[in-house]
Image (tube, helix red, strand yellow):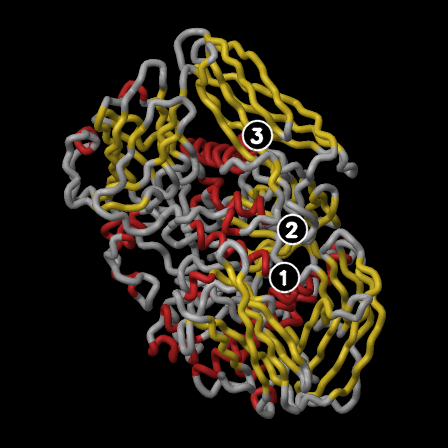
Amino acid sequence: MLRNRPLPTLVVAAVGLALLVPGTSANAGPVPGTGAALEVAASPGTTSTIPDWRMQTSKTAGQAGDVISGPAYSDSGWLTVPARSTVMAGLIANNRYGDVNYSENLKKANKADFQVPWWYRKVFQADPQPGVNTFLKLNGGVISRGEIWLNGKKVAGTDTVVGAYPTHEFNVTGLLRKGDNALAIKASPSDPAKDLVIHFIDWSQLPPDRNQGLFRDVDLVQSGPVSLRGLHVLSDLPLPNLNSATVTVKVDARNNTGSAVTTTVAGSAAGQNYSQNVSLAANETKTVTFTLNVSNPQVWWPFQMGAQPLYDATATATVSGAKSDEQKTTFGIREVTSKMISGNLQYQINGKPILIRGGGWASDLFLRTNVQKIADEMMLTKSMGLNTIRLEGKPENDEIYDLADRMGILLMTGWECCSKWQNTGGFSAEDKRVAGASAEGEAKRIRNHPSVFTFLIGSDEAPVAAVETIYLDALKRADWQTPIVNAAARRSSPQLGDSGMKMDGPYWWEPPVYWYNNQKGGSAGFASEIGPGLAIPERDELKKFLSDTEINKLTDYNATQYHLSPSGNFSKIGFWGTALDNRYGKPSNVDDFIKKAQLQQYETNRAQFEAFGRDFSDTGANQAQGVIYWMQNDPWPKLFWHLYNYNLATAGSYFGAKTANKALHAQYSYDDKSLAVVNMGLQAQDGLSLQVTVFNSDGTQKANETRAVPAKANGSVRVGTLPQPSGLSPAYFVRLLLKDASGKVVDRNVYWLSTKADTLNYNGGDWYYTPQAQYTDLKSLSSLKAGQVSVSSTTTPGTNGRQATHVTIKNTGTSVAFFLRASLRKGQGGAEVLPVDWTDNYITLFPGETETIRAEYRASDLGGAQPVVELSGHNVSKR
């Protein structure tokens, strides 16, 4: 559109996040002084990662690479930047522009500064030893092109190091010196229209440097006469039987010498040992293979379907009894397949169909890696009930894959739209080489992760035949096992055939009823990216990145908003605001606008996911197979396309989705007033009942009935229709209480509805929206009688530095207490604690009802203050 850490032999999923995340982020921000000392030990099997860089523009550092890479060269006045640092990220770390998240400060960066190359430089110490080889490894490319120098000698030029994703390894043994060594990398300017790099399209304002520079680690790797590379594990399950598995371990053994050598490659996987003697000719590489039969394997599942056990695999090469190299990795035993159902793609995990419910991931705008933030986002993802994250053209660094493996969240990867990646018909010979190297490098990097379940070699368009062949050959070389799809849109290609996915929009406002129609983005087939656009945060968050003037401007729907998209289609609030005015009443001020925005975001986000959940058990072309919400998160603070915001604050968008994506859930259908029970688990649930209560807007009951309901495994069941009592108020409420055999409520869901329906004009609109023909009438919700509630809270310590605050809210009045939001504060009147994992929020209570919701968070995020709960509601004053 326009727009491996080794584990114990077996690790199970119930691992706290504190055990998964290092104590510091990979990019911790500004680096003091001239950087950390680095000593590269001549020890086979070790890797030394460049910890930081000195960085300077070529406008200032005008010398050639042979000079700049000299150990004695003075880099006084250069900036010290983190290890993974684009040029813009390095400048931000050194506070060159102030807070680039706030207002229009990002405009302070002069784009002309990035139309020239920039230099990265690192001095390190080494003590080369006979028989020990040193390899310079780039774990990703240099954006857009790189020139590599070591100790005054050119290692590679821009004809070799091209693009964002190809990996590179160079033998630099002969260039190392005892004592000081200097590595220098020159990064060319970036233009996503000319090179296969990274582009943020219309996702937010664009990085001024277009992500020029380094964004992945650069390593110095040591080995003896034989190196091991590419340790990976293939697993095969004899589906539908899960009682055994064939596990194939492969590793490449490379002779680094000019003479023949014999090496012993030995290791273990899935609790079994293996060993093989390998003869290698001079400079020869052989793939060493071990085949294991595993009885009763611990099978990996997405989190709503089962556990996430992980195994480790090791390989060590010895020559004449001495260690020459070693590798370790983790893997999971699982099998992903796919099939077409009436032209739509369905995925199966371990032989079981799965409804893909996910979000489109946005990397940090400046490609910085903050491991703790990524872990927090994964926590919010899982808590929201999303089982999938789509990485469109932004394959992240290794940490997100490790976390996804442990948390049972699926990852779909692939290339981006709307840049050079999409113009496969115009690829030059170099482009084709880089495209193939990109696919092979990325596939080899992530193939061991059980969370990765598919690879999309195209986004909005399928690659042309020649490039399709290049991608498929590259993935074959990488031993890629999971389904490969040619496009996220409904496209066809010679070898892969039809994609089985659709990309029909919308990307801007649609009412809840839209999602239940099988037309366009409605709940049929696999919708690879759809969503209702605006996602206005609460005022606390708006104040972090907008001035008061900019906040007040939100009520001008025709005004260009800098924190929307640079695309004209998405730069204004536009008809999203028109719908808000017509459905809820024109806001009286900006605070009323923010309050009503949460209602509108909650109801349509809930409906989007609920519609696909309901229709997962339809048949034929009407069966829902998957939905990716556009988008999940923010690369930079913005007002649209997210389920939680840049600072990990959760508002109406998040909780609407969270409600819909519960593993066991009772829901209402806006199209035909039917009710359904959706069960994403693999076990049927017996003995359930559903209490359905209809309330007028004043809180009086109009209907109340209880019916026995089934919940079949891994699917949905329709359980009748909503009662239609006479005398309903123009706006009214519906409460669904799903109870187990003991009468315990296992799911609670409240709707606010109208006797006047939203309708759509499918003959109008454009690729990114379908216009409304009629608006529902929910205006009377703004004149509800004031609600009365009591609030109490208790806080208890947890594990791994976390604690929980339980908030009990009781409706003590005679009217509905509508859309109550609890927030956790750092002391009375303090800032909001973020991130917080709430069990529920924005809840509605009827007279006499009591609900308890729980907030979990890091105790350290309180900053030494006591947790204080603040409550507000649509008709309840803040307290």
User: What residue appears at the point 15 percent right and 45 percent down from the top-left corner?
Assistant: 77
Q: Considering depth in this image, is 350 or 839 the residue closer to the camera?
A: 839
Quadrant position of residue 834: bottom left
User: Which secondary structure lies at badge 3?
Assistant: strand
Q: Is residue 731 left or right of residue 530?
A: right
Residue 587 in the image: x percent, y percent?
49, 85
* Identity, as a three-letter code, of the amino acid under mark 3: Ala
Residue 183: x, y in percent? Answer: 26, 32
Q: Secondary structure at mark 1?
A: loop
Answer with the quarter of the image where residue 50 lies. top left
Q: Residues within 10 Å of mark 1 (few under 14, many from 20)?
A: many
Q: Secondary structure at mark 2?
A: loop
Looking at the picture, does residue 295 appear above or below residue 870? above
Q: Label 2 to label 3, Cα distance in Å?
A: 23 Å
| Distance between mark 1 and mark 2 Cα atoms | 26 Å
Image side of residue 102 versus residue 780, left or right: left
Q: Which residue was labeled with disc 2?
A: 303
Side of 5 where 116 appears, left or right: left
Mark yes or no: residue 69 visible: yes
Q: Is residue 177 above or below residue 869?
A: above
Q: Residue tagged by mark 3?
A: 313
Dot placed on the residue nearer the N-terminal end, 1 or 3: 3
Labels 1 and 2 touching (C-beta < 8 A): no
Frontmost of labels 1 and 3 is 3
Q: Which residue is mark 1?
A: 521
Instruction: Give the residue drawn at x 51%, y 27%.
Output: 230
Amino acid type, callout 1: Gly
Q: Residues within 10 Å of mark 2 (few under 14, many from 20)?
A: many
